[in-house]
């Protein structure tokens, strides 16, 4: 496990509340890895949301060089109906309409992390380049109150099978993090145990708001 901290840890608070967790991807509206985890996480005690980090929302189109591109802020409902009109057969066959239908039942539309002012306890990415973008985002900001946030990466391929497996992996990790009474002290050991059990490399960094 690769792990590093970017600043001194602030004083620990004795207050205990359910932890806020987000999963982050680049920009694909499908967000199968992140959103697949929502129904699983929703049955647990922690709160989970999903975000993208790219400039636009992109979906596969009729050809590799013809993606469907939307602005962040576009609703899943709009995207769903747009693809239905363009080629219902194609986007039904490749699973996009099914995933969009699921996504629109979870939240209104894709959200961009850089535009979010909320604070989270844990940020989980599913791809190393997204992990790097998240670190760059925090490092480019001026600290506000030095509230710590744990940024974690678990590589999960963006396909149906891996998304299903990844949802349970992320849920298992979040459950362990939520069960910890002292996350600041426990997280390194928890991640090492998770990495060994899941047989996947885990990246970890502490950033600050």
Image: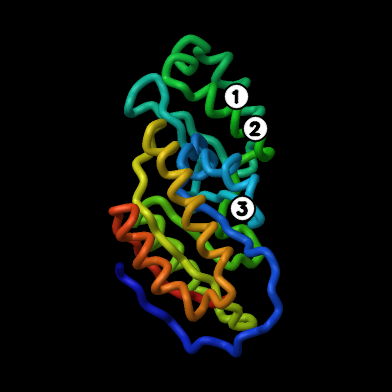
User: Do the residues under discs 2 and 1 have CB atoms within 8 angstroms?
Assistant: yes
Task: Give whichever of 61, 6 is nearer the camera.
Answer: 6
Marks 2,3: beta carbons within 8 A: no
Image mark for residue 104? 2
Pointers 3 and 1 in contact (C-beta within 8 Å): no
Task: Estimate the spatial distance between the alpha carbons at disc 2 and disc 1, rounded to whole Å.
Answer: 9 Å
Residue at (30%, 60%) from the top-left corner? 196
Report the residue marked by disc 3.
48
Mark 2 or 3 closer to N-term?
3
Secondary structure beneath label 3: strand
Query: Does residue 105 sit above or below 5 in this rendering?
Result: above
Nearest-to-viewer mark from 2 and 3: 3
Q: Earlier in the sequence, mark 2 or mark 1?
A: 1
Nearer the viewer's eye, disc 2 or disc 1?
Answer: 2
Residue 139 visible in rendering? no
| Closer-to-camera residue (34/193) | 193
- Residue at x 51% of width, y 78% of height: 184
Q: Quadrant of the N terminus?
A: bottom left
Task: Give the total of numbered labels.
Answer: 3
Q: Is residue 20 above or below residue 208?
A: above
Residue at image point 63% right, 51% down: 44
The residue carrying mark 1 is: 80
């Amino acid at each position: 496990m690769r792990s590093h901290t970017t600043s001194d840890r602030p004083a620990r608070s004795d207050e205990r509340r359910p932890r806020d967790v987000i999963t982050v991807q680049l920009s694909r509206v499908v967000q199968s890895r992140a959103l697949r985890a929502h129904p699983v996480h929703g049955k647990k005690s922690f709160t989970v949301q999903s975000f993208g980090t790219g400039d636009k929302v992109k979906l596969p189109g009729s050809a590799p060089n013809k993606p469907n591109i939307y602005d962040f802020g576009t609703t899943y409902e709009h995207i769903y109906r747009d693809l239905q009109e363009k080629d219902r057969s194609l986007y039904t066959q490749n699973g996009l309409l099914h995933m969009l239908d699921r996504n629109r039942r979870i939240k209104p539309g894709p959200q961009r992390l850089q535009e979010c002012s909320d604070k989270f306890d844990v940020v989980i990415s599913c791809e190393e380049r997204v992990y790097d973008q998240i670190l760059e985002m925090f490092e480019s900001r001026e600290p506000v109150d030095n509230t710590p946030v744990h940024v974690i990466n678990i590589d999960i391929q963006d396909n149906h099978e891996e998304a299903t497996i990844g949802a349970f992996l992320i849920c298992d990790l979040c459950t362990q993090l939520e069960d910890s009474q002292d996350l600041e002290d426990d997280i390194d050991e928890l991640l090492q145990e998770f990495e060994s059990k899941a047989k996947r490399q885990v990246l970890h960094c502490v950033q600050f708001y």
